[in-house]
Image (cartoon, grey):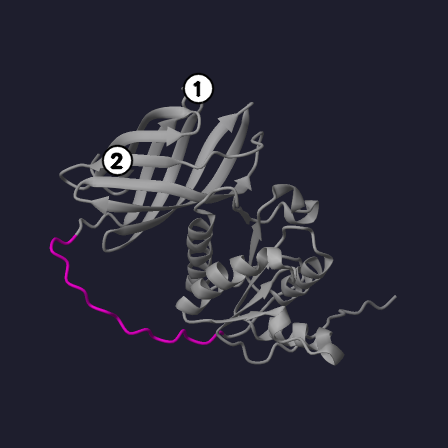
Amino acid sequence: MKSYKNSVLIEIGDVENSCFVVMPFDSLFQTQYERVIRPVIEGLGLKCIRGDEIYSKPQIMADIWNSLRKSRLVIAELTGRNPNVFYEIGLAHALGKPIILLTRNQEDVPFDLKSLRYWYYDVNDPFWGENLREVVKTAVQNILEQSDLPSYLEGIKADFKVPALPKKESVKRKAAVAPKDISGNWKASWKRANGTIEHQGTLYITQQEEKLSATMTVTFEKAQKMTIVQEVLIGMIQGVQVSLRGVSYTYIQQGASTSYLLDSFNLKLSSDKNSMHGEFNSKRGTGEATFVKLGSAH
């Protein structure tokens, strides 16, 4: 019997500097979109588009499809298990588009998507808007810096060119005393308050004057199973005092962990700027934490 190599050709067309936002059309998410997601996207030089802003009744499906094809990336809100949201995520996966998954309820992440990274945020936290803003900004920047496109499904190979981002004018500001530069990669270790579970972290810090933003990959063993978490942190450096506060996390490998307590650090920078030592804080108490810059002699 003769075998055929069957294929389906999807025409992407020109990709724009845009982000297509997939979320339920509900007032519950209006503040999240208008005050958090859209300002971050537009601040990074991308056009932000939400479905209800472009849909026309006779051609709803065509509008969705065209917007997904043209978009540089997609942000999807999983909270509420909205079927339209899941359908559009499936279309984006088939197109090979990078997707940032958000949820305020981890139980709303279906089994089929749990193997992918999703970002959990807690609306009971009074700073949830600020925290989510940092999470979205970091996630989008990571996508824009990547040259390779994701591969979600076997047999789908995406190959399209993305436009260069518009250049933003730099604003020069004079500081009385320039803060010490601690950007780069750091290795961290600490124990939870009960002192029984050792945590190891690989931290990457980016710095804009005194403001810090960071991503940290944390590994620890619980019930003889390894858990790997990726965490987003924000913070400040003032003189030699460094503060970092976790704002969101996603599991890379869940292991026996059912939830993760976000980390908070108050540290002192060494004179050679190659190590930081200080206090670790969590809802379960405090402990000591040590950070060593990778590539240093420590």
Magenta highlight on residue 174: yes
Q: Residue lying furthest left in this view? A: 176
Label 2 amino acid? Leu
Question: Which residue occupies 65% across, 59% down?
Answer: 24
Name the side, left or right, on which 94 lies relative to 164: right
Residue 40 x/y as whole percent: 43, 63
Query: Is disc 1 surrounded by few (<14), some (14 to 19) or many (20+) residues within 10 Å?
Result: few
Label 1 amino acid? Thr
- Taking depth in this image into account, of 50 and 144 the one nearest to the observer is 50
Residue 9 x/y as whole percent: 69, 75
Name the side, left or right, on which 84 lies relative to 182: right
Task: Say which label, 2 or 1, has the lower sequence index.
Answer: 1
Question: Which residue occupies 53% across, 63% down?
Answer: 149
For the residue labelled by badge 2, is the local secondary structure a helix, a strand or a loop?
Answer: strand
Q: Is residue 36 above or below residue 18?
A: above
Range drawn in magenta: 162-178
Q: Are marks 2 and 1 in contact (CB under 8 Å)?
A: no
Question: Which residue occupies 26% across, 70% down?
Answer: 170
Residue 54 x/y as whole percent: 62, 76
Q: Which residue is mark 2?
A: 267
Magenta highlight on residue 161: no
Residue 158 x/y as whole percent: 59, 68
Q: Is residue 207 above or below residue 258?
A: below
Q: Which mark is residue 3?
A: none
Q: Quadrant of the C terminus?
A: top left
Q: Main secondary structure of the magenta part?
A: loop
- Taking depth in this image into account, of 224 and 206 the one nearest to the observer is 206
For the residue labelled by badge 1, is the local secondary structure a helix, a strand or a loop?
Answer: loop
Q: Which residue is mark 1?
A: 196
